[in-house]
Image (tube, grey):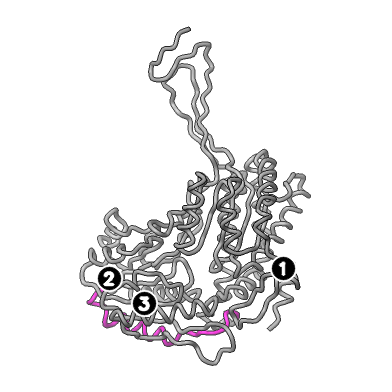
Amino acid sequence: MSYQKLLNDLSVNLDANGTLEVHTPIDGSLLGKVTERPVSEIEAVAVNAQQAFLEWRALPAPIRGEFVRLLGEDLRASKDLLGQLVSVECGKILSEGLGEVQEMIDICDFAVGLSRQLYGLTIQSERPQHHMREVWQPLGPVGIISAFNFPVAVWSWNAAIALVCGNSIIWKPSEKTPLTALACDEIFKRAAIRFKEAGHEIPEHLSQVIIGGRDLGEAMCQHSAFKLISATGSTAMGRKVGEVVAKRMGRSLLELGGNNAIIVTPTADLDLAARAVVFGAVGTAGQRCTTTRRLFVHEDVYTSFVPALQKAYEGLRVGSPLDSETLVGPLIDEGSLNAMFDAIELAIEQGGKLLSGGLRAKGIDGGAYMHPALIEMSSQSDIVKSETFAPILYVMKYNDLNDAVMLQNDVPQGLSSAIFTNDVREAELFLSATGSDCGIANVNIGTSGAEIGGAFGGEKETGGGRESGSDSWKAYMRRQTQTVNYSSDLPLAQGVEFNL
């Protein structure tokens, strides 16, 4: 199948002599070639970003918000096309591809509101006739490193907020999904043209897309010009980013993988729980940071709930993500497929029993298509505590809620968690300080991420990043305390005397 028209409609320019080949996970066919930026050019990128920042920060925040409003409008106009490209390039079913673009639009709306809410504080001074205040100033160039599983939303989360905060942005997309980044760059340029036509100034190089591999990301992390590095990806990648950026006293914002769990209690609405569990476990072929990977089911409902899951798994439609009937698309590549096979083998060695799936889908030409695996475990073994980026759901039985919560928390990752219960005491226990230790804790909804405005991120190895929430903008700004003396005296703090 040719996707050239789709790329043309989004103004994605390919390079026949490009150094990076881009393949679709749908059938493995070549989408095109793009040119990578050599590491040697990172200095020029940094210089351009700094100059753009110096110009952009001078605009009032509501004016910067107006640009983000226009960007949201252009994303709305391109939603169908960009959503299709997301599906083509990373393998999400079309509904999820469109949903990701809608997330981009929503974050623009959120950021526009924030542009008039970059509030500081008035601080009471111990000195007479003094005025103190806390203000927040633009930070500087922001580097964004995104993963393949959310090829465009991650950029929008960071870019929209960074822009209203007065920063320039530099985006290194995953080398597996550069075409969606180039499409977003073209949409950005269209918004910039409209912004200029409305009479506003916008600096050149306000947003830069740089395509390349790991070495390019490392160069970004090492360069002092990038005041904040926001990275999404594996915990191993995030650990490296955090270390490198910290060495130069820079800031990092990390949103990494999550080995997420759901607890199903005896009072749960089992039909509701089953739908949420299956969607959480197999959506995006198990390649979300919020994918459900562990399931704790109370012994009183285990024998009825788990067979219902098996039946649902057996009816899952695996195939092309562009087919409206498909519920499970392909894994991103053969490497992911092999990692899934390895994890299943280890789970069986550690006492697991394969209840459903775990086999390669037949009758599909090209692509790494797998039937999602449902594995019953007698205990939370080492493989269960490890995150495999694939549709594997480990099911375990429990009889005491406190034990289930303890097991849920007993993993290195801490992104998302959920409980299904109609008992208010169980729900409140789960949400209390002695309950879930994850960045997201949900009741009767599954492990889906926090919506726009929520404190999305995580704890422990998940990184603790916060890309949204009421104070999310503070990550993209620097705090400054300002003190004004409007007297003719010079009183010193803490009663210090210094008389000449």
Q: Which of marks 2 and 3 is nearer the N terminus?
A: 2
> Are dots 2 and 3 in contact, CB under 8 Å?
no
The image shows residue 355, relative to residue 143, as above or below, that is below
Residue 451 or residue 147, whichever sits in front: 147
> Are dots 2 and 1 in contact, CB under 8 Å?
no
Residue 320 in magenta? yes
> Are dots 3 and 1 in contact, CB under 8 Å?
no
Between the residue at mark 2 and the residue at mark 1, the CA separation in whole angstroms equals 47 Å
Residue 220 or residue 442, whichever sits in front: 220
Q: Nearer the viewer, mark 3 or mark 1?
A: 1
Q: Residue at x 54, y 65 (%)?
A: 147
Q: Which mark is residue 265?
A: 2
Q: Which of marks 2 and 1 is in front?
A: 1
Which residue type does callout 2 highlight? Thr
Mark 3 crowd level (few <14, some 14–19, many ≥20, 10 Å Cα): few
In this rendering, position of residue 161 left or right of residue 425: right
Residue 117, percent from left and from top = 55, 42
Farthest bottom residue in view: 363
In this rendering, position of residue 70 left or right of residue 162: right
Which residue type does callout 3 highlight? Asp
Which residue is labeled 1 in the image? Answer: 10
Which residue type does callout 1 highlight? Leu
Q: Which mark is residue 271?
A: 3
Q: Residue at x 59, y 86 (%)?
A: 366
Q: Can residue 109 be seen in this view?
A: no
Q: Which of marks 2 and 1 is nearer the N terminus?
A: 1
Mark 1 crowd level (few <14, some 14–19, many ≥20, 10 Å Cα): many
**Span colored in magenta:** 298-322
